[in-house]
Image (cartoon, grey):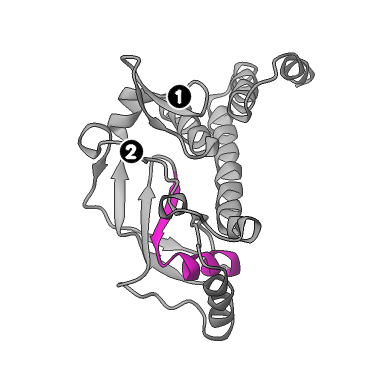
Amino acid sequence: MQKILKLLKRKKGTPFKTAMLAIKNQLNEMDSVDEKITLLKFTRMAIISELALSSINSLLYTGKFAEWEDRFPYLLSGMNREHYYELLDDTCECDLSKNKVVSYPWHIDRYFNAFLIIAQEDFRYDELNHMISYYPQLNLYVAYNGLHSISAGVLSQNGTLPCNEVYDLTKMFENIHTEDGLQWVHTDGFVVGEIPDFRFALIFEISRLLRELE
């Protein structure tokens, strides 16, 4: 571990590059495949947990989102579904007491009111309002509607709801990578799209390593 820390001090870079360097060096020092898988799953969950909390609280720090698009800096922004991912017929449930959900509430009054309502009445699923996408290969949940009440449910660890969309990212794993955490790059070398948050890139690349080990 000391060797890894010294290496990180010498090679300063983006948070994505720093994290990936540390992870890969640690994996190289481990012999057990099971231990490598455990390390990657633990690290991925730590990143997802941080991303989920910071996405929910970002409204407090920014005051408001300037543009509509800024509310949805999602993993697959700008990607062509036909070429890079597939919508599955699978159904699954998201348990807000256990699963961390990336959600971007956008109105401060609705943000606070959602907490007051859930504190008094618990989370109530509304099929016309609450919508979540799930990426099983990343173990990642992303809300795209009902953002205020879902955010409140995540922080209060209260409620369950079905995932409206479940995506298979096999094509993405086969054709896409990132070297800097800033852009998705095709294996042929051209840029596919911008990455809205380097933590999405970390979750994806860690999942790629898991996929190779498993």
Within 10 angstroms of label 2, few (less than 14), some, or many (20 or more) residues? few
Left or right of residue 137, residue 6 in this image: right
Q: Residue furthest bottom?
A: 120
Q: Which residue is mark 2?
A: 78
In depth, the one of 118 and 68 nearer the eye is: 68
Within 10 angstroms of label 1, few (less than 14), some, or many (20 or more) residues? some
In depth, the one of 76 and 139 nearer the eye is: 76
Q: Which mark is residue 13?
A: none
Q: Which mark is residue 178?
A: 1
Snapshot quadrant of residue 163: bottom left
Snapshot quadrant of residue 128: bottom left
Query: Start and end of the magenta stretch?
Result: 139-156
Element at badge 1? Answer: loop
Q: Residue at x 28, y 30 (%)?
A: 171
Element at badge 2? Answer: loop
Q: CA distance from mark 2 to mark 1?
A: 15 Å
Amino acid type of disc 1? Thr
What quarter of the picture does the N terminus occupy?
Answer: top right
Task: Please identify, in this view, whether the residue under mark 2 or under mark 1 is nearer the observer.
Answer: 2
**Disc nearer the start of the sequence (2/1):** 2
Left or right of residue 131, residue 71 in this image: right
Amino acid type of disc 2? Gly
Query: Is residue 169 one of those drawn in magenta?
Result: no
Residue 48 at x, y percent in the picture = 55, 46
Q: In the figure, 86 relative to 214: above or below? A: below
Left or right of residue 7, residue 104 in this image: left
